[in-house]
Image (cartoon, rainbow, N blue to C red):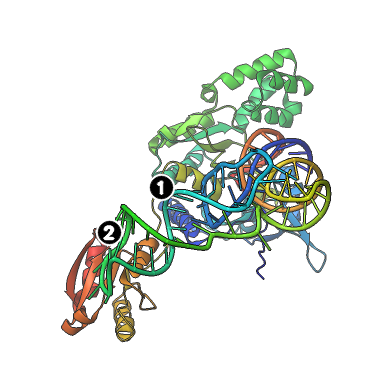
Amino acid sequence: MKTKIATVKGARDFYPEQMALRSWLYANMRAAAQAFGYQEYDGPFLETLDLYAAKSGEELVKEQAFVFNDRGGDQITLRPELTPSLARMVAARQGQLPRPIRWWSFGPFWRYERPQKGRSREFFQWNVDLLGVDSPAADAELAGVMAAFFRNIGFGPAEIKIQFNNRRLMDSEIAALGLTEQKKDVFRLIDRRDKLSAEAWDKYAADLGVTAEQLAGLKAMLANRELWRQSEECQAFLTAAAALGIADFLEYDPTVIRGLDYYTGTVFEARDREGEFRAILGGGRYDNLVGDVGGDRLPGVGFAMGDVVIGLVAQKYGKVGALRTSPSDVLVTVFNAETLPQSLQLAAELRAAGLRAEWYPEPVKLDRQLKYADATGVRFAAILGPDELAQGLVMLKDLANRTQTPVVRQQLAGLIQEKGRQ
RNA sequence: GUGGCUGUAGCUCAAUGGCAGAGCACUGGACUGUGGCUCCAGGUGUUGCGGGUUCAAGCCCCGUCAGCCACCCCA
């Protein structure tokens, strides 16, 4: 009797194929972050509920975090985001960490929400943060890391855009409209600009107590793609971005607000230009977060990118390619039971020479062994039969171009290494 | 947490309430030492799961689980 036990809702199995995608993303994230001098770190996966209590958006913690009581009765949270942990870690060693602090991380996070395309309950997230620098150029550097990653995986500005806005700019605009008291509601209203119909949006605004005059001003503001010119911060940000060579990726959008409460300045959001998917990443400047968890005030800027949406976007745009699931450089085939130890020995010789070599563990038809190499992405097959053994040769087959050549056994490893580089 | 759509072979999908099908993949053979092509022969199955209605349920009804869509929120 076979019983199937399902995975937890919103959790994913990573078969070698999916694992290869995750590893590919990780390798490119690491390359992008390290290119700018960022150091890898990580926080605990389990945190106290208190860490998130006053910080993140209310709903993120109260409604979307996995919270449980441990055996001692304490309330434990599976981390829904990394930034509060980062702030705590930095605050705890504030005096001894060299600044600026450039840190990045990639690990699992959990949010208890309804799974949909691009949203799961257990996901991996890339976090990149720069602390100790309060300048628009620092904000631009973060955009530079994003752009470097996009380029690493084959995306250009024609396919991906990095939208930005500035909370301080929006604060002053909202103040000018006399809406400061309803700021949070107005931010929420702005966030819904593209989601609601024009009528529904107007009604929503009216329900919030926005007057007709204020509404007109708000609409004018949101339609103004040049609004950034009124912010010195935005101007300096774009100047630095241009110097970094990433201006083509950037697009000012006054409707980009971001939900998290702790953002204070620049905010980011990256999307595919066609707009088919939800936001690929989000982030911004948070100047009070470290101080809020007990440290001295330390400005910071950062962003987070989940593995799910970028994986979908990369696959949609054909950037993923054929990811190999086998690490092997070469498959040693087996002719029959008598020659099997010889194949085993040849595989050992190849490994001793520094190659990653696997052998086919039973004497089945050769076409099956080659099909296996094909299916798992092993490029070379070392064919060892009675004819080759009698002559001290190995037939080296290159599955990539369907050629094969007899090779003196002692020269096999060197030849594979040489051809593998081509 | 709210509302809706879907669930059939490993994968992509068909079947009026009346005997479960196609393509790809897989296995064996044509090729007893050569992978993408061709041909032949074949497993392809608890129709997500549990109830109910009916002479009869993949199909209708209820529940449940999962995925997806719109909210909510957000990576």
In this figure, which residue is indicated by the disc labeled 2?
Answer: A400
Q: Position of residue A385 (x, y in %)?
A: 25, 79
Relative to A130, residue A352 above or below = below
Residue density around tag 2, few if under 14, some if 14–19, many if 20 or more, within 10 Å: few
Res A373 → quadrant? bottom left
Q: Which of A205/A284 is in front?
A: A205
**Left or right: residue A180 compared with residue A276:** right
Q: Which secondary structure lies at badge 1?
A: loop
Q: Which of B49/A379 is in front?
A: B49
The quadrant of the image that shows the C terminus of chain A is: bottom left
N-terminal label among 1 and 2 = 1
Question: Looking at numbered disc 2 in the image, what kind of residue is underneath it?
Answer: Ala
Res A314 → quadrant? top left
Pointer 1 with pointer 2, Cβ within 8 A? no
In this figure, which residue is indicated by the disc labeled 1?
Answer: A153
Q: Which chain does the residue under circle 1 lie in?
A: A
Question: Looking at numbered disc 1 in the image, what kind of residue is underneath it?
Answer: Ile
Q: Which chain does the residue under circle 2 lie in?
A: A
Mark whose residue sits in front, 1 or 2: 2
Q: Position of residue A67 (x, y in %)?
A: 75, 56
Q: CA distance from mark 1 to mark 2?
A: 23 Å
- Residue at 66%, 28% in the rendered image: A192
Relative to B15, residue B47 above or below = below
Identity of the residue furthest to the top in this view: A213
Q: Position of residue A56 (x, y in %)?
A: 69, 45
